[in-house]
Amino acid sequence: MTGIRVADLTYRYGAIAALDAVRFEVDEGAFCALLGPNGAGKSTLFNLLTRLFVPQAGRIEIAGHDLQANPRAALAKLGIVFQQTTLDLDLTVRQNLTYFAALHGLSGRDRARRVDMVLERLDIVDRAKQKARTLNGGHKRRTEIARALLHDPAVLLLDEPTVGLDAAARAGITDHVHGLADEGVTVLWATHLADEVRPDDRLIVLHQATVLADGYANEISGVKPLQQAFLDLTGADA
Amino acid sequence: MTGYLTALTAIVTREALRFIHQRERFVAALVRPLVWLLVFAAGFRAALGLSIIPPYQTYITYETYIVPGLCGMILLFNGMQSSLSLIYDREMGSMKLLLTSPLPRWWLLMSKLLGATTISILQVYAFLAIAAAFGIVMPPLGYLTVLPALVVSGLMLGALGLFLSSFIKQLENFAGVMNFVIFPMFFMSSALYPLWKMAESSELLHDICAVNPFTHAVELIRFALYASFNPAALGWTVLAAVLFTGLALWGYSPEGSGIRRRG
């Protein structure tokens, strides 16, 4: 089954196209990096994939569900980590997770069990009683990823999740999410940092509202380092 | 259905926790009407002569007259404030979280509205208690019968705030909301003076006050505080509540502009 299918997606802000007939597919359980410079259309694509916007043309399928025709089934399969933190800083980690689980209609023992499970999965059990405000950047991100996994989504979207993190925390989060893909979760990871992409990752390069390259990272970069290949593709100076 | 109730409970609880964590907001929300009641009303007591109009059956002091208007003021400010807080990115983030839940959007927004209204009503009761401590008391039954009036009025004003928040891009626009929404709604209503008093000065102003939904909310609260019922006020308040809720739901629909404007 396909994890994410995007067909001929178009979105304009007035005369300016943010996405122009964008199409791609991501297989189930694949880690797919969405690489693009600032202003490439990544954020618009995320807003469309999460149904905060509706496409002006084209279709989106999440784990086999059409997002337009059947939004609730599609959203139930979707875990999202937004670029800016969406934690309630005055609540503890556990309270944040419990609140989100409730937004998905989860309650009682099942909810408590799931919260314990994701805390363990992201290795933040010891932070559960801490207020989100007191967490460091890396642990905030881990909490948000834990939260996105609470309802056992088939597809995980992450919008530049390592922004503002130090090198160690970045590597930790990147490794962890790669691990999730190995467990069968389809991952779409938006970034503008080529070093977060591994050679055998699926890679989509988005530039000026269109898909510039679609394949595996090692195929797209060829013999060059990916960073250089990316800069060459997008026409930016090194 | 359990899922719906679970989400509703969680959203209302979160609003309550936010309220507990922001004690300054609670104090500020109480100071405003208390200044009006204990300072402004005391000063104006002599200047304004009030005749006996329903629901009052006897001469009343000016302080007693403005209590329902000040209850309305708390609901009005809170309705605008809780929605304007959405303009902060942090609150906007939590809104995104809400809107990407698989439950129907209308349900989630209504839950949020109900949560904010619950908090407002707690503040109104705190205000009524302080007013009572200063000797401005209502009939005992009135404290109970006012509850449904506060719910309807609170939902109406909260929905207006939610609708406005889907159009306001920046926090600086709060001044605009003060000038163009809060002040006109409050002053062009029966909160501070009965409408017949307004008619003596200007028929036009009287007519504007008479269509202002806030006037009807205040009158609904005023009658309910005296355990009597004003069907016209209820009708207009409910109508405005339905209209503003419809606009708020549209504003936050994927097709609307609420999220799009901020990306």
Image (cartoon, coloured by chain):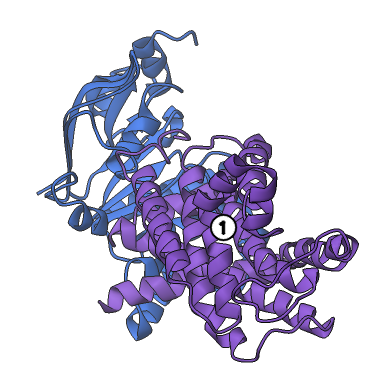
Chain colours: A blue, B purple
Residue B74, by quadrant, is: bottom right
Of the pair A135 and B88, the residue shown nearer to us? B88
Q: Is residue A17 above or below residue B76?
A: above
- Which of the 4 image quadrants contains residue A199? top left
- Quadrant of the snapshot with the N terminus of chain B: bottom left
From the viewer's perspective, tell me whether residue A228 is left or right of residue A32: right
Type of amino acid at the residue the image marks with label 1 = Thr
Q: Chain of mark 1?
A: B
Secondary structure under the numbered disc 1 in the rendered image: helix
Q: What residue is rendered at 60% in x and 45% in y?
A: B88
Q: Nearer the viewer, residue A47 or B74?
A: B74
Crowding near the residue tagged with mark 1, few <14, some 14–19, many ≥20 C-alpha atoms within 10 Å: many
Q: Is residue B49 left or right of residue B160?
A: right
Residue A204, by quadrant, is top left
Q: What is the x, y in percent for residue A68?
A: 17, 44
Residue A86 visible within the image: no
If the image is split into quadrants, where does the C terminus of chain B sit? top left
> Residue drawn 82% across and 84% down?
B133
Circle 1 residue: B215
